[in-house]
Image (cartoon, coloured by chain):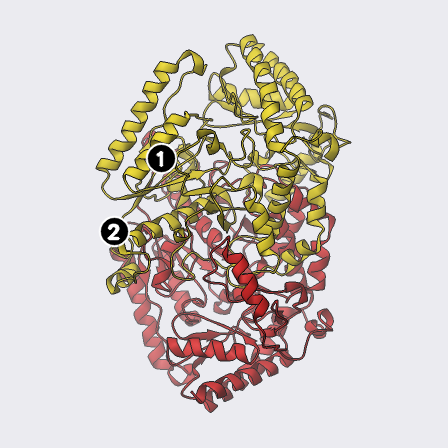
Chain colours: A yellow, B red
């Protein structure tokens, strides 16, 4: 669909043209203290006035207004106080969903089919069904369950019944009822923080230290050298090595590997990219060994990479078996295409709520807007406009801005700072000039703006980054 | 607080006085088919028109209206289309929460402290802090994580740093970073369906067959005989036996037991009750062995048992360490009182969203209403009115309605059918007379009405149950 006129201008006529810094922190301190009486606030950065935030700009309670390229850890698709979502939020269906929350897989609402069909207009190619969950962690946790059930049902036949031994052994957590099955994920991967999904996650040690974990294998992502066009041969060899290692794990792991879970760009892990060829190789291995391929698109999904789904950059010959999503959708779940990905018996994949219809309605509004306003194509264009400017910045600050990556990936762009300490200094300096920006593993800074982030926002961002590096270069 | 005039009469002046059966199913069939194109509908009973549902009565899309004593698996506190919640759902804060969803432990909203402080007005005695999650499963999964982190932080000292060995071993899912720690739960217990929480769950085999599981110990609930006043001595001996078995597990389990998780009434497990003495014994064992006590009040919490929290019936000498909640709150999380239940470092207990402020606002409205209208006391009164009527029904149908339980537990009442097949017949017959009722493990039927379910509703329910058993007795 062709991009309409600028979406931000249409949605946010009163959006500021740059940050507004009142340099006060009084209310933030007070309100954080008040929160601290009743909840853990060690992670709180500042307290926000979302009613005064607008589009790509985030307001705190003191009146500081930041250009926000982090957007609630990549989870705001359209910007703050979007007028279309405001309408959705005030609709009769929304009031219904909020005050009459159903057990949606038991007693669904009469608007549920419509809303989900609209969400599916934005699903990955070939994925025409969805299982709704509550968060990215929950989506991955549920995808794991579906994968395990699928693996065992393939073994015994989809319509076959459980054996008495299976049913009995479950109660003491033993095989065959609770089988030893594994899922392969990757070092640097982040797949959430439920006790199940965190067994996949291997981005940072502090996420999971002290927790019992399933001993599941971790592949190694290829360690690519940048800029990519300079290191084609080395990178191809590195990817072949990483794939060999994955196949070696399949051959030697102590138990069957029911699925491979991977992000199309390892996001919390520091924006680790690999080529289409690598991902095709991985798909081939899963097919060879009868394992499922699950793309975790919780962070990459819904357009930020310049395609609706990041794995569509790879043009795989066979579609993935499941694609998990959350964040920008504001709802969560996984898309799939094989009806047998759900077990034959009712109430096995099940929860009281299985998602939240209020968030399903918001997701419907977001997907409709993304498609109607051509926001994926626009994000692609903005990325093409922005990336060369960042390349210039990287040339200007060669000691500070390293390994710029995300070319041809829309605004899903990242770079490294010299180390983790520099990264912390970088965030503080950015905030001091009015830019709210976040990072990934160890020394990465990343852009995760909305899909209404346009060329003017890009210009402001580049100007603020220039100021930020200027401050750092004087340290 | 004294109970005001009848809440249902005030909230729902147009509530029907009994079920309305149009005996048509056409639209239900159509809409279920439509849903089936895009999601798994094996568990769907019927499709609802929630906008036409009112108070304690649930409308389907064909126009059938049922007296609903299941209430979305015990998760509707006040009834359908509650006018106070309608106001909350249309408030400026709600629109804000829906369209500007924050990463609430990073960049909380300026209304968050107020809303949570209001929710805490309904927290269990001595529990003055809360960690917000998304569902009951998620609350238990998070409580487990907090318990494991707490256990290890007690060992190394709250302020001590991780060792290099801990941080490295985590990446290959090995000790000491990922320690072998267990949590004790009970056979018949249900604690959710994330891969973590399902390792606690031991209610029905089909919940967890085919899934890898942590091998954690399961205690046995005392198997009490009814009516309780007839079997005092036998039941006391049975409870002593169950406690001894728990202590035996603590003495012999292969690894430390960081916590005990238990429901005050095992709900999905078939409403398994035990005495205050049993629970005090359990608390004593946890204190003796340095283990935490976590009450899972996802189903029992917020008033249905005639106290705000079911475990308050036990008058424990030491409060539990955590109390998980969800369902009737529409939000979820766990209450706690020791600030060190949260790890010393930021972002360890963490997720992008950590709950949903839209649901936090609904929870605020629900808790305010429960307290203002004295709905816990009213539910206690209704239970006292209802229970003797059910006793009479059990006398009338002694072959069909067995082991009536939940005396002095408000409307949290259950009984057994002769077996699982009879239970299925019972549900179908109940629905045919206009009663929507659900069940627990194997052969249990249970009442889980709203907190506005009053004496008139109780009369209608008894009449419909009488009709239902009448139908069954002719089979």
Q: Can residue B247 be seen in this view?
A: yes
* Left or right of residue B80: residue A287: left
The subunit letter for the residue under badge 2 reads B
- Above-or-below relation of B134 to B51: above
Residue A56 placed where, x, y %? Answer: 67, 31
Residue A315 position, x and y percent, is 44, 31
User: Do the residues at discs 2 and 1 belong to one chain?
Assistant: no
Q: Quadrant of residue B23?
A: bottom right
- Asked if marks 2 and 1 touch (Cβ < 8 Å), the reply is no
In the image, residue A278 sits, relative to residue B327, either above or below, namely: above
Chain letter of mark 1 equals A
Query: Which residue is more in the foreground, A455 or B13?
Result: A455
Residue at the image point whose x is 36% and y is 52% from the top = B290
> Which quadrant is the C terminus of chain B positioned in?
bottom left
Q: CA gap, disc 2 to disc 1?
A: 40 Å
- Position of residue A19 in the picture relative to residue B357 (left or right): right
Q: In this view, does A77 lie above or below A144?
A: above
Mark seen at residue A470: none
As helix, strand or loop, the secondary structure at mark 1 comes to helix
In the image, B249 versus A368, the foreground residue is: A368
Residue A104 appearing in the image:
no
Front in this rendered view, residue A185 or B296: A185
Res. A306 image quadrant: top right
Give whichever of B19, B226 is nearer the camera: B19
Which residue carries the number 2 mark?
Answer: B254
- Whether residue A207 sits left or right of residue A365 in the image: it is left
Say which quadrant the N terminus of chain B sits in: bottom right
> Alpha-carbon neighbours of circle 1 within 10 Å: few (<14), some, or many (≥20)?
many
Percent from the top left, x then y, of residue A410? 56, 26
- Residue A274: image quadrant is top left
Q: Which residue is drawn at 67% across and 79% down?
A: B17
Q: Mark 1 points at which residue?
A: A283
């Amino acid at each position: 669909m062709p991009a309409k006129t600028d979406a931000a201008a249409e949605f946010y006529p009163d959006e500021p043209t740059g940050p507004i810094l009142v340099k006060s922190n009084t209310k933030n301190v007070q309100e954080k203290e008040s929160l601290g009486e009743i909840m853990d606030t060690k992670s709180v950065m500042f307290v926000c006035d979302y009613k005064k935030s607008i589009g790509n700009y985030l307001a705190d309670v003191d009146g500081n207004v930041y250009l926000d390229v982090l957007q609630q850890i990549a989870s705001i698709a359209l910007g703050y106080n979007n007028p279309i979502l405001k309408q959705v939020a005030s609709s009769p269906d929304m009031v219904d969903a909020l005050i009459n929350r159903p057990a949606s897989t038991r007693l669904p609402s009469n608007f549920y089919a419509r809303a989900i069909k609209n969400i599916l207009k934005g699903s990955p190619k070939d994925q025409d069904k969805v299982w709704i969950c509550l968060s990215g962690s929950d989506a991955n946790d549920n995808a794991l369950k579906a994968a395990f059930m699928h693996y065992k049902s393939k073994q015994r036949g989809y319509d076959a019944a459980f054996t008495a031994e299976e049913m009995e052994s479950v109660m003491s957590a033993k095989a065959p009822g609770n089988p030893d099955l594994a899922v392969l994920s990757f070092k640097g991967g982040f797949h959430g923080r439920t006790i199940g999904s965190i067994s996949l996650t291997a981005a940072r040690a502090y996420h999971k230290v002290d927790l019992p974990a399933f001993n599941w294998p971790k592949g190694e992502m290829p360690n690519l050298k940048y800029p990519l066009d300079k290191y084609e041969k080395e990178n191809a060899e590195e990817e072949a090595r990483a794939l060999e290692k994955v196949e070696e794990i399949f051959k030697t792991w102590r138990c069957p590997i029911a699925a491979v879970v991977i992000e199309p760009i390892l996001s919390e892990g520091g924006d680790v990219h690999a080529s289409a060829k690598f991902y095709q190789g991985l798909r081939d291995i899963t097919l060879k060994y009868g394992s499922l391929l699950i793309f975790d698109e919780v962070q990459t999904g819904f357009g930020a990479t310049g395609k609706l789904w990041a794995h569509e950059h790879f043009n795989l010959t066979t579609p993935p078996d499941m694609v998990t999503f959350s964040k920008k959708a504001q709802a969560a779940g996984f898309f799939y295409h094989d009806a047998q990905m759900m077990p034959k018996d009712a109430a096995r994949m099940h929860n009281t709520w299985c998602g939240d219809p209020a968030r399903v309605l918001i997701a419907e509004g977001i997907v409709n807007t993304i498609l109607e306003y051509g926001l994926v194509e626009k994000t692609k264009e903005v990325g093409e406009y922005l990336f060369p400017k960042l390349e210039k910045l990287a040339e200007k600050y060669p000691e500070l801005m390293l390994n710029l990556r995300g070319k041809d990936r829309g605004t899903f762009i990242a770079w490294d700072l010299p180390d983790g300490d520099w990264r912390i200094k970088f965030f503080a300096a950015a905030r001091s000039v009015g830019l709210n920006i976040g990072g990934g593993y160890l020394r990465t800074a990343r852009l995760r703006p909305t899909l209404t982030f346009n060329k003017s926002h890009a210009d402001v961002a580049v100007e603020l980054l220039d100021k930020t590096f200027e401050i750092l270069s004087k340290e």
